[in-house]
Amino acid sequence: MMSFGSFVYIACLLLNGANMLLQIFCVIMFSDLEMDYINPIDLCNKLNDLVMPEIISHTLVTLLLLLGKKWLLFLANLPLLVFHANQVIHKTHILDATEIFRQLGRHKRDNFIKVTFYLIMFFTLLYCMVMSLIQEE
């Protein structure tokens, strides 16, 4: 029988992997906008549909780590959770097609930082999951 700690690591790993792929997709879309392969309205329509699922899944990851008493990983995820909360409170999480070119550099930078964060967390969670499953045996 799998322990709750192993379940937390597996669930967080899957959600974190999905968020990482989502951010890679966003970086590709912003690059397409820079190269003029996609127009700003289509970009905003596609990416705005993906913003809240990313925020919700990252919130779920953070809550699972808190409930699983994985304090160090919880604290590592807390700054991004605060960043997401700040975006939602100030309504800057939604992309505006009329302003996207002025804010493109900031959005690309934020997404590269998120990809890096999710990549580091992915391998950290993978290591923790493997160690947790080995210790159960």
Image (cartoon, rainbow, N blue to C red):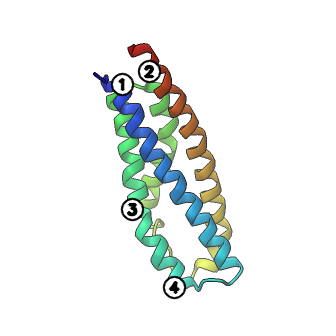
In space, the residues marked 3 and 2 are separated at their CA atoms by 31 Å
Q: Which percent across, then down, holds residue 127?
A: 54, 28
Which numbered marker is on residue 41? 4
Q: Are marks 1 and 2 in contact (CB under 8 Å)?
A: yes
Check whether the beta carbons of the residues at disc 3 and disc 2 lie within 8 A of each other: no
Q: Which residue is mark 3?
A: 52
- Residue 86, quarter of picture: bottom left
State which tag comes first along the sequence, 1 or 2: 1
Residue 89 visible in the snapshot: no
Question: Whole-Å distance between the Cαs marked 4 and 1?
Answer: 43 Å
Q: Secondary structure at mark 1?
A: helix
Q: Residue at x 41, y 61 (%)?
A: 88
Q: Residues within 10 Å of mark 1 (few under 14, many from 20)?
A: some
Q: Which residue is mark 2?
A: 132
Quadrant of the frame with the C terminus: top left
C-alpha span from label 4 to label 3 = 18 Å
* Amino acid type for the residue under numbered disc 3: Met
Question: Residue 30, relative to residue 60: is it above or below?
Answer: below
Query: Which of label 4 and label 2 is nearer to you?
Result: 2
Q: Which residue is mark 1?
A: 5
Vertical placement of 123 versus 57: above or below? Answer: above
In the drawing, does residue 40 fall left or right of residue 14? Answer: right
Name the spot of residue 65 as percent of width and height, x first.
Answer: 39, 33
Residue 22 coordinates in the image, percent (x, y): 51, 59
Mark 3 or mark 2, earlier in chain: 3
State which mark lies toward you, 3 or 1: 1
N-terminal of the two: label 4 or label 2?
4
Q: Quadrant of the N terminus?
A: top left
